[in-house]
Image (cartoon, rainbow, N blue to C red):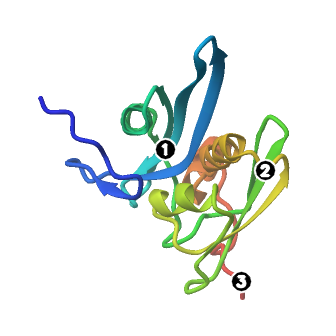
Amino acid sequence: MANEPKQASVTTEERGFDEELVRIYRCSKVVKGGRRFSFGALVVTGNRAGQVGYGYGKAKEVPPAVEKGGKQARRSTIDVVLNGSTIPHTVTGRFGSSKVKLIPAAPGTGVIAGASVRPVLELAGIRDCLTKAYGSTSPKNLVKATLDALRQLRSRETVERLRGVTLAGSGKAD
């Protein structure tokens, strides 16, 4: 098996999953001969059809760190409830001191999000969504908060089944 270095941008995997590098972290420790560097890679993967995951890989060089992060991201995928090209309802996700609010948007709006939240939403298959980040803007925490918000999404049918009732109205504004 040949270890070929991966690109730092978007790559297409054999199972239909796309991979996007959100951030590279460089860490150094001081030793007798100077500094020793190591790298961490925050990677998001998704199939753009309702599945998304994230991973964080660490290694002495960048390509192996990205590869490890991608492997972990594919193992940690979650299913996301979609309503066409947007999300079914407004939701807030939290992780650490970061909060991310996701708001459904009309078709054609696009994904209005920062650099850390955007890849998670796009790789999940969400094409129209408004977002707002509160608190810490650490990329790791924002990605985790966004995934927390996506886990909280419920479809209309799921809510009716869980509550044992039929909700009135069609769910659309008159």
Q: Earlier in the sequence, mark 1 or mark 3?
A: 1
Q: Nearer the viewer, mark 2 or mark 3?
A: 2
Q: Which disc number belongs to residue 173?
A: 3
Q: Residue at x 72, y 88 (%)?
A: 174
Q: Crowding near pointer 1: few (<14 within 10 Å), some, many (20+)?
A: many
Side of 19 where 39 appears, left or right: right
List the residue tagged with mark 1: 43
Furthest residue in direction front, as rendered: 33
Side of 24 where 75 appears, left or right: left
Furthest residue in direction top, as rendered: 32
Q: Gap in Å between the C-alphas at discs 1 and 3?
A: 38 Å
List the residue tagged with mark 2: 137
Q: Which residue type does callout 2 highlight?
A: Thr
Q: Tell me the element at label 3.
A: loop
Q: Quadrant of residue 156?
A: bottom right
Image quadrant in which the N terminus is located: top left
Q: Gap in Å between the C-alphas at discs 2 and 3?
A: 34 Å
Image vertical order of residue 144 relative to residue 13, above or below: above
Q: Earlier in the sequence, mark 2 or mark 3?
A: 2
Image vertical order of residue 37 relative to residue 86, above or below: above
Q: Residue at x 83, y 46 (%)?
A: 136
Across and down, in percent, residue 123 comes to 46, 58
Q: Tell me the element at label 1.
A: strand
